[in-house]
Amino acid sequence: MAEFLESGALIDAILVLVALEALAFLVLYRRVSTAPRLFAPHLAVLWPTLLSGALLMLAVRLAITDAHPMWVASVLAAAGLSHVVDIMLRFRRL
C-alpha cells in the first residue's frame, strides 16, 4: 500500500477523475444550454475551480515523487493564481 501511495498512482487516478468531471460538465452544459440561463452555470465559473484543484493534486504528486522543488513551487504558484481568479469570479457574481 505504501508503494502505491509513494508512486503517485493514487494522485493520477484522482486527476483522471477531475478530467472526467470536467468532461461530464461540458456534456451536461451542452444539454442544458438550450434551457433558460438560470439552469446553466457559466463555464468561466467552473474552470478556475477545477484547474486550481487539479494543479494542487499535481503539486502533491510532484512532491511525493521527489520532483525538483522548483517544479512543485511553480505548480503551486499556478494553483494559487487559478484560485485567485476563482475567488474574483465568485465575488463578481455577488
Image (spheres, helix red, strand yellow):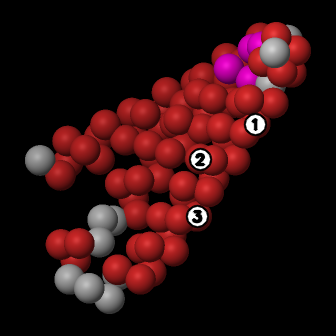
Residue farthest along the left direction in this orientation = 94
Q: CA distance from mark 2 to mark 3?
A: 9 Å
**Considering only vertical position in the picture, is 62 above or below 29?**
above
Q: Secondary structure at mark 1?
A: helix
| Mark toward the start of the polypeptide (2 vs 1) | 1
Q: Amino acid at mark 2?
A: Val
Q: Amino acid at mark 3?
A: Leu
Look at the image and give the residue range highlighted in magenta: 60-65
> Which element type, helix, strand or loop, lies under badge 2?
helix
Could you say which quadrant of the image residue 88 lies in?
Answer: top left
Circle nearer the N terminus (2, 3):
2
Q: Is residue 70 visible?
A: no
In terms of secondary structure, what is the magenta stretch mainly? helix
- Residue under the point 45% across and 46% down: 48
Q: Residue at x 20, y 48 (%)?
A: 92
Please give the residue where the numbered disc 3 appears in the rendered image.
23
Please determine whether, in this image, residue 63 is positioned above or below residue 8. Answer: above
The amino acid marked with disc number 1 is Asp
Mark with earlier residue (3, 1): 1
> Residue 12 shows which numbered tag?
1
Queried whether the magenta region covers residue 63, the answer comes back as yes
Q: Which mark is residue 18?
A: 2
Which quadrant of the figure contains the N terminus?
A: top right
Secondary structure under badge 3?
Answer: helix
| Residue 85 % position (x, y) | 39, 41
Residue drawn where x is 59% and y is 47% of the image? 18
Give the mark count.
Answer: 3
In reply to whether residue 15 is colored magenta, the answer given is no
Task: Name which residue lies at 54% across and 43% down.
Answer: 51
What x and y, as percent, mark residue 6? Answer: 82, 15
Whole-angstrom CA distance, mark 2 to mark 1, is 10 Å
